[in-house]
Amino acid sequence: MKDVDAARAPVGIATVVAASLLLALLPWERHGLLASCLGTHPLGPEQLWAGWNLAPETLLLVVALGVVVQRRMRAGGPWLLAVGLLLMGIALFSPLCRLAATLVSAHMLQFMMLCIAAPILLTPLAGIARLPLVPLAVIYAGVIWFWHLPPVYAAILDHAAVHLVAVVVLLGTSVLFWRSLFGVARERPLAALVVLLLTLCHTGILGAWLTFSVRPWYPFLDDAVALWGLSLLEDQQLAGLLMWVVGGTAYLLAAVHLCTRALRRGLQAGMAG
């Protein structure tokens, strides 16, 4: 039965993604709670707590994932899955989502929740395959860098369908990457550690580049950033520091966890021998 459920999982996920994309492509005008987190809805300080978002396409995705999490928990799965789902909800439905369409720094916080925090907690989900780590690490790196290219960033903020696809690709790639990383760490901890440290390096480079750049990468956000009394460069520098320092710390803590787990297993094997 478990094998059948695992085989059906990709089909179910593909169906939900297709239905969500169809909703995102429908030619309707949505405002208030039903609006996507796009650049056409900049969020000022006075509207912060009214900036909740229940865009139908995103809601469908998270509800479907919530059903999967609930089934897993009924089978004795860890509560970490529920926390991961909660972080996804905060990133995609709370005022943070619309703030991420206003400030690059808020976008970076949302980005790290979707590519580090929530995926790590969602890795125990049943039916998720463990794919080869090195290709996944390359894809994961590509997604992170591609997302921050100015034309891609602008498209994500301008089109609901692009926004949805970007979220699906980022979250899906991240869950697969972390699941494979932790899986490889059980048998080849050194290989997993090298991959993780390389990920720390390239994300740190991107964060430092954002921080020390003398030109703003996203000039199209000028009016939105001004709502918060910041310049484009100030907002971009804060975003770079979030990726460089906070994101780097998260990767470093994951590396420490891998080392600790490997040492514990080595000690247990030595005592057993």
Image: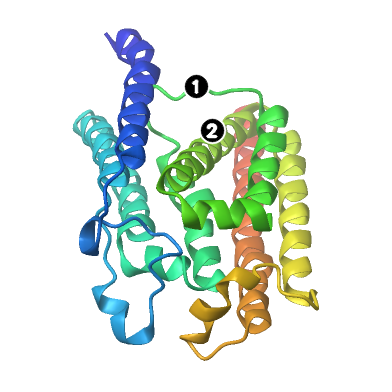
Depth check: 221 or 250 in front?
221
Question: Would you identify the image quadrant in which residue 244 lies?
Answer: bottom right
- In the image, residue 51 sits, relative to residue 271, either above or below, namely below
Residue carrying label 2? 176
Mark 1 vs mark 2, CA separation in Å: 8 Å
Depth check: 117 or 106 in front?
106
Amino acid tagged 1: Ala
Question: Would you identify the image quadrant in which residue 73 lies?
Answer: top left
- In the image, residue 164 sits, relative to residue 4, either above or below, namely below
At a point 60% along the width and 69% down the height, the residue shown is: 220
Which is more N-terminal, label 2 or label 1? 1
Q: How far across and down, in percent of the image, does residue 123 sit?
A: 45, 37
Q: Is residue 272 left or right of residue 214?
A: left
Label 2: state its secondary structure.
Answer: helix
Q: How far across and down, in percent of the image, does residue 141 sit?
A: 69, 44
- In the image, residue 135 sits, relative to residue 110, either above or below, namely above
Residue carrying label 1? 129
Amino acid tagged 2: Leu
Q: Are marks 1 and 2 in contact (CB under 8 Å)?
A: yes
Q: Quick check: can you spot residue 2?
A: yes
Q: Is residue 82 left or right of residue 166?
A: left
Q: Quick check: can you spot residue 79?
A: no
Q: How far across and down, in percent of the image, does residue 203 sit?
A: 71, 56
At a point 63% along the width and 45% down the height, the residue shown is: 258
At a point 53% along the width and 43% down the height, the residue shown is: 170
Q: How far across and down, in percent of the image, does residue 267 sit?
A: 64, 39
